[in-house]
Image (tube, rainbow, N blue to C red):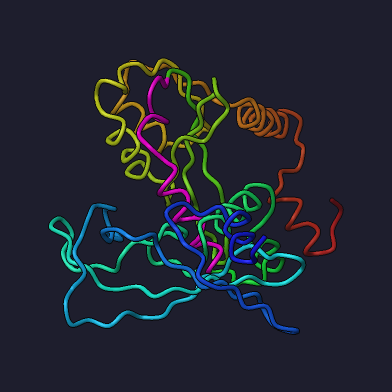
């Protein structure tokens, strides 16, 4: 079997031709490829486009998954094309997403691992930057998500996630029936959650029956404004926390127990706790 045919079978790229393979004693494996003969495709919409006359192709490289413990690089020449819908864009290549320096298979592998561990670990494992991992996740999610994830929502949960330094917040909406996260956005205000209901639309908002949340006044306001018919259920942790605080405050007033502020003042001045 020829080396080019072997790599064509291993890589499995559709509409692609392996021209040559360079394997040196040291360094990465370099595979020169080109799209199969035919009309170029627009890198924006994927539709048919015309190659601009008088423009020179540009040599580009994409990192692929390693083979036999060595890094694999895909090399090809791309041109600028004219699309009736998008205008002048870079041509589409079958093995990579537009604007990426990694192959589609490599990015899918990174995204799969990112679902199971943190971003820093993924960047170290694949030997790419932390920011590159985030951009890969954005491209994969943008391609994979569709509007069907918001269909049939009846029993949902809303909560925020804290991350980063200084602290940042992410509002997350979960479908309790399927157990999947269906929507997320930066922030934890009523306006943030309002964006979810705006994307959902009036018809799908009318199907929501129950919304679980913590005792956030902002989330409750958004639910009351957009789905007033839905029943709000507070999570048990915050309900128990509130009851504990109230009972402690009542017992302190009833039996003269020192409050938290009094205990702090007493310990600061060396008095009994």
Q: Determine the image quadrant of residue 5.
A: bottom right
Is residue 140 shown in magenta?
yes
Is residue 238 shown in magenta?
no
Residue at x 44% of width, y 73% of height:
76
Query: Is 87 placed left or right of 157 in the picture?
Result: left
Report whether residue 128 is seen.
yes
Report whether residue 250 is seen.
no
- In the picture, the quarter occupied by the N terminus is bottom right
Which of the pair 259/137 is nearer the observer? 137
Which of the pair 208/129 is nearer the observer? 129
Which of the pair 16/164 is nearer the observer? 16
Indicate whether 238 appears above or below 33: above
In the image, residue 64 lies at what x, y percent? 59, 65
Indicate whether 22 appears above or below 3: below
Query: Which residue lies most toward the front here?
Result: 1
Residue at x 63% of width, y 25% of height:
236
Residue at x 38% of width, y 29% of height:
148
Which of the pair 4/10 is nearer the observer? 4
Q: Which residues are magenta?
A: 132-153
In the image, residue 217 lies at what x, y percent? 42, 36
Residue at x 67% of width, y 66% of height:
126
Query: Which residue lies most toward the left here?
Result: 84
């Amino acid at each position: 079997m020829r080396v080019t045919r072997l790599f064509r079978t291993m890589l499995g790229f559709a509409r692609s031709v392996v021209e040559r393979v360079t394997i040196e004693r040291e360094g990465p494996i370099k595979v020169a490829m080109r799209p199969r003969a035919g009309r170029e495709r627009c890198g924006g919409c994927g539709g048919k486009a015309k190659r601009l006359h008088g423009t020179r192709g540009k040599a580009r490289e994409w990192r692929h998954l390693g083979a036999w413990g060595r890094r694999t690089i895909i090399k090809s020449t791309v041109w600028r094309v004219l699309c009736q819908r998008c205008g002048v864009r870079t041509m589409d290549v079958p093995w990579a997403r537009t604007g990426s320096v990694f192959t589609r298979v490599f990015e899918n592998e990174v995204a799969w691992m990112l679902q199971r561990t943190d971003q820093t670990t993924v960047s170290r494992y694949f030997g790419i930057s932390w920011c590159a991992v985030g951009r890969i996740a954005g491209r994969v999610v943008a391609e994979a998500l569709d509007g069907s994830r918001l269909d049939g929502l009846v029993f949902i949960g809303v909560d925020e996630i804290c991350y980063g330094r200084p602290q940042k917040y992410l509002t997350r909406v979960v479908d309790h029936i399927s157990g999947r996260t269906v929507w997320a956005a930066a922030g934890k205000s009523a306006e943030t959650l309002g964006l979810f209901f705006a994307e959902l639309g009036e018809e799908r908002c009318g199907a929501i029956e129950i919304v679980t949340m913590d005792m956030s006044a902002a989330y409750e306001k958004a639910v009351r404004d957009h789905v007033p018919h839905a029943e709000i259920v507070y999570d048990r942790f915050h309900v128990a926390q509130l009851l504990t605080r109230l009972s402690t405050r009542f017992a302190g007033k009833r039996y003269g127990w020192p409050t938290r502020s009094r205990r702090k003042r007493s310990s600061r001045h060396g008095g009994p706790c």
